[in-house]
Image: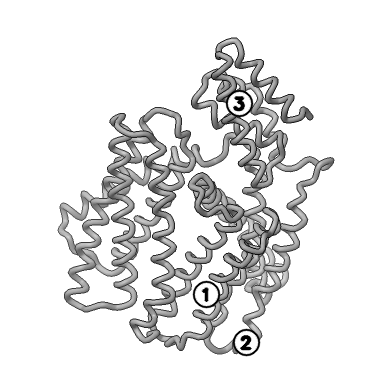
Amino acid sequence: MQTLDEQIAEWRSHLSAGTTESDLEELESHLRDQVDDLAAVGLSDDEAFLIAVKRIGGADELSREYAREHSGRLWKQLLPPASRPDPGLGSALAIAAAAAVAVHLPRFAVDPAGDPLPMLRNVPVIVLAFLGLYFLVRRGPTVRTAIWTGIPFLIATLVLNLYPWDPDGQMVVISIPATTTVLWFTIGLPYMGGTWRDHERRMDFIRFTGEWFIYMVLIALGGGVLTGLTAVLLGEGLVEWLVISGAAGAVVVAAWLVESKQSVVENMAPVLTSVFTPLFAVLLVAASVDHLAGGFEFDRETLGIYDGLLVVVFGLVLYATSARDPERPPGWMDRIQLVAVGSALLLDGLVLGSMIARVGEFGLTPNRVTALTLNLVLLVNLVWAGWLGLRFVTGRTVFHRMERWQTTYLPVFGLWAATIAAVLPLLFDFA
């Protein structure tokens, strides 16, 4: 295994034939900054070096050739070799096992024949608390980061368990996903090592979220098979416990897999965005044309489906932004993504119009307030993302502006979710 300085010397030698000395010094400075940032999140020098070379390859053709020639090493590092075990694996498994056990603690405060909502309210808090603990351990805990991470979890626990919820009302059901969203943003703080103002680290957290979701889907597919076999061989009595424990542990294991797989240069993000962005663009265009041709009436179920579709499209745009090489000039995928954003804007406008009409006719309810405000938050994001996307594909701005817009706007979603979880119940008497 070469040292970092030896690898950089080899890289400089490869570039020296077609690059001036001053340019080499500038590129090396940029390379070392990238290596330092990647090492700060737990990567080895060898892994950080190769990924850094890949990242700056967009600005330098010779560096891109070097990354292409040497990236084969990374596939051998997809999982840590037996001679050099990942130091984070042991802590990940221990925390996952603890989460799998702790997630059942609310059962002892709930009558199994009674209301299941106390169990449902506390599961996200418990599981995400263990995921936050995993990042605190992996990054190296600091008192400041631990305190700022713990405060939202404490507030969420008090809100979910001390508010006088109406068990038959809408608000208690709405509060669970809203609180989960807030806590997901909260674990971004230990993931980023406390550097929450750093836009690059925010984009890393976006990338992590997408990769984590992919691993959770893969784990769920395997877990479904295991659950089915358990039900057949051992009876259905253990299935509920197995599913809940397995899902809680998988949250931490999936995070470890993402962290370990960061050493692979060519990750899944570019492939997935290339496949799904055109498909969702076509779907959005078809849905918009259908409702423009058939009138502007939406029933309640259709509004819910389109709200979910808009959230998925926003997530896809965000993930595509995190996966794209910022130095690459505009291409056909950027134009397809612009079509998807434009179609989402049109559909969002139709949905908002229908929602406002329903509010005027039937009045405000927790569901309508939640959906209406979510669509407004999405509308603002998509409008500016579409404008920046148009300027980018026409050569009037740089891609970095699009990245900065998304990372700057991200806290707005956290603030919206916190308002829905903690303030909206007060306005509707917890019903």
Which amino acid does the dot numbered 1 rest on?
A: Ala
Image point 33% across, 52% down: which residue?
381
Labels 3 and 1: the sequence-earlier one: 3
Q: Which residue is mark 2?
A: 109
Which amino acid does the dot numbered 3 rest on?
A: Glu
Which amino acid does the dot numbered 2 rest on?
A: Ala
Q: Residues within 10 Å of mark 2 (few under 14, many from 20)?
A: few
Q: CA distance from mark 3 to mark 1?
A: 46 Å
Quadrant of the snapshot with the N terminus: top right
Q: Mark 2 falls on what kind of element?
A: helix
> Are the residues flagged by discs 3 and 1 in contact, CB closer than 8 Å?
no
Is residue 324 depicted above or below 156 in this figure? above
Q: Residues within 10 Å of mark 3 (few under 14, many from 20)?
A: some
Image point 16% across, 56% down: which residue?
294
Q: Which residue is mark 3?
A: 28
Q: How many marks?
A: 3
Q: Residues within 10 Å of mark 1 (few under 14, many from 20)?
A: many
Q: Mark 1 falls on what kind of element?
A: helix
Q: Which mark is residue 156?
A: 1
Expressed as whole percent of the image width and height from the top left, the position of residue 389 reads 32, 39
Labels 2 and 3: the sequence-earlier one: 3
Q: CA distance from mark 2 to mark 3?
A: 59 Å
Labels 2 and 1: the sequence-earlier one: 2
